[in-house]
Image (cartoon, grey):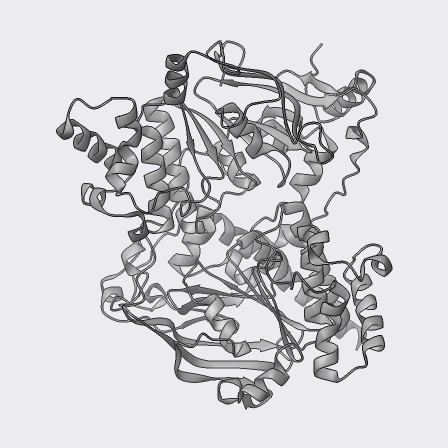
Amino acid sequence: MELDNAKKVLEVSHLKQYFNVGKRDEVRAVDDISFDIYEGETFGLVGESGSGKTTTGRAIIHLYQPTSGSIKFNGQEIIGMKVAKKMQQFRRDMQMIFQDPYASLNPRMKVKDIVAEGIDINHLAKNDTDRSKQVADLLATVGLNRDHASRYPHEFSGGQRQRIGIARALAVQPKFIIADEPISALDVSIQAQVVNLLKQLQRERKLTFLFIAHDLSMVKYISDRIGVMHYGRMLEVGTSDEVYNHPLHDYTKSLLSAVPVPDPEYERTRKQIKYDPKFEDGSKKRELVEIVPHHFVQCSQDEIPMYQERAKKMGLSVKE
Amino acid sequence: MQSKETILDVNHLKINFNTYAGTVKAIRDVSFSLKKGETLAIVGESGSGKTVTTRSIMGLLANNAVVAGGSIQFHGQDVLKMSQKQLEGLRGAKIAQIFQDPMTSLDPTMRIGRQIAEPLIIHKGVKKEKAMAQALEMMKLVGITDAENRINDYPHQFSGGMRQRIVIAIALINYPEILIADEPTTALDVTIQAQILDLMRELQDKISTSIIFITHDLGVVAGMADRVAVMYAGKIVEYGTVDEIFYNPKHPYTWGLLSSMPTLDTHGDELASIPGTPPDLLDPPKGDAFAPRNPYALKIDTEQEPPFFKVSDTHYAATWLLHPDAPKVTPPEQIIERQKKFAVMQKEAEAKEQHRIEEEEEQQ
């Protein structure tokens, strides 16, 4: 993708999300992160549990009230948005697919009512026939059939439930979808089906995705660009090929070296790189710096030359 | 590897579950053996019967389970015919298990030193002080830092990775002959997973236990297993050495599993996926259970279950495609790539063998 001319849909800057502020057990779940997401791309967010990737997703979709910072969606500031009408439009434009397909569907609602809830709230259906038709179309889009509409969630397998969750997200014709670990609860053979469906929907509907996951091979496969999070901070951002093939930050290197690969030869010779968190010890002020065009690393001013040197050694052209 | 003694022999195991909806045929004729010191990985989707298989080895089947046939021979004794008392002597002493979720498999109200020492006190009758001293040694062995000060801590004071180390310490304190690891790293982050897997490999060398490793993650299998058994719908469909399964798979289900997982080099618009969902074991389909999802299915697959066909002395697969009369099919692209690698590896191994023979002749 041509990043220089791409339009920014989402601009997150200096986002902080703290919990229990001012108390002894204050948690800085997301601590001053900035990144942009371009129209039509898939931005993957990776990191270990507790790194703040889910919190970031939830703060963006306004499930939390961020502590400070700014989140702009199509140029409009989301944080502190007061006008109810604008907020409702935002909630239509941005939808979420959740991790656990067993917990995210109301067991007492029929599939058609689950899928149509957004349609009802936003008055998107002219009458009952139109509503049923929209539901049937959505179910067909995600690979289910119209007979499924009058059933309850417990009658479905995990993969099918996740498809219902996707249909529900699509019902309000969103432009932006946050998918928080959408496949980690599914079996290997079903994961590929759901990933293919998401990619197909993205092509057909020109959707933008924020894809949150800890499965690095899957994130690499599905994402155009990737952000690596650790301890609530963003350590590296770049195109997925570059982050995976030419990681600049030590943490990214260590994380990638731990990914098990289905290749016994490779596994026998694998060396895991130990991580020494000296480059994020909090002693210096560190920000994301563009080392190579569109490839950012969190570092302090005096560390820039070191990363530039690393990039040069990998044969990358350093940003002047 | 072949010459080593077999310590566990599972023969034609069949297990059903009686439920309100009918009889679920969870294990449908499973046979395998485990040799001393080796790691056998059992791979499959949820519901394929991998966990039920290991639970039957531990004598931990649910009340509604019925053993419909077969035997599990451990040192010449059938585990399935043992009394509760005999089983209690087996579990935690000769055969130990690590469970998937380190958050729920420890007792939250018991200090961890005591939990680690408990199997010693119960099975070996070791006195408390001595058992605690051994527990401390074990904590150090599994890499719990500052063990002296942490021996009296409770599970909630440890992180997930540390808790899994504690679970491993409990399982290994009696130096079991067989360690069953049921998805031991699924709940952990990749970096922690790598540490735990390293630890398991290291400990296996030290105490030469055999490991049955259950997982759905083929990446983990590639790094851990000596041999691999692939399960589908309550049956083993293919088994062989780790290289044979990863570089020369013969069963279309194994092909599907291997090509539906993206590696860090996978590109392209679409992942190869296995269509459909696993069959309902209340009413398993006639013939090959994988046939409805199998793009390579032959007509006979819907009528008759395929027997095991021999690929090599260590490699067998249950698919009609291996029958001499079966049509030749082209496996998915990713599999062909893997087979190329296998051919190169075999040639190298042959050359090495040749070289060795020549050297021996020279010496004579």
Picture residue at 76% right of the left edge, 61% below the top: B142
Q: Quadrant of the N terminus of chain B?
A: bottom right
Q: Tell me how many marks there are.
A: 0
Q: In this view, does B85 lie to the left or right of A190?
A: right
Toward the viewer: B112 or A197?
A: B112
**Up-down relation of residue B353 to residue B155 (above or below):** below
The structure residue drawn at horizontal position 72% and vertical position 46%, both measured from the top left corner, is A272
Q: In which quarter of the image is residue A217?
A: top right
Residue pictured at 30% horizontal, 64% vertical: B326
Task: Tell me where residue A305 appears, x and y as whole percent.
Answer: 80, 18
Residue A213 visible in image: yes
* In this view, B284 is above or below A254: below
Horizontal arrangement in the rendering, residue A14 relative to residue A225 (left or right): right
- Considering every residue shown, the one lying at the far left of the view is A129
Which residue is at the front of the view, A174 or A131? A131
Q: Tell me which residue sits at (69%, 54%) in the image.
A: B156
Quadrant location of residue A220?
top right
Residue extending farthest to the front is A23
Q: Is residue B204 visible?
A: no
Residue A200 position (above or below residue A217): above
Frontmost residue, B246 versus B167: B167
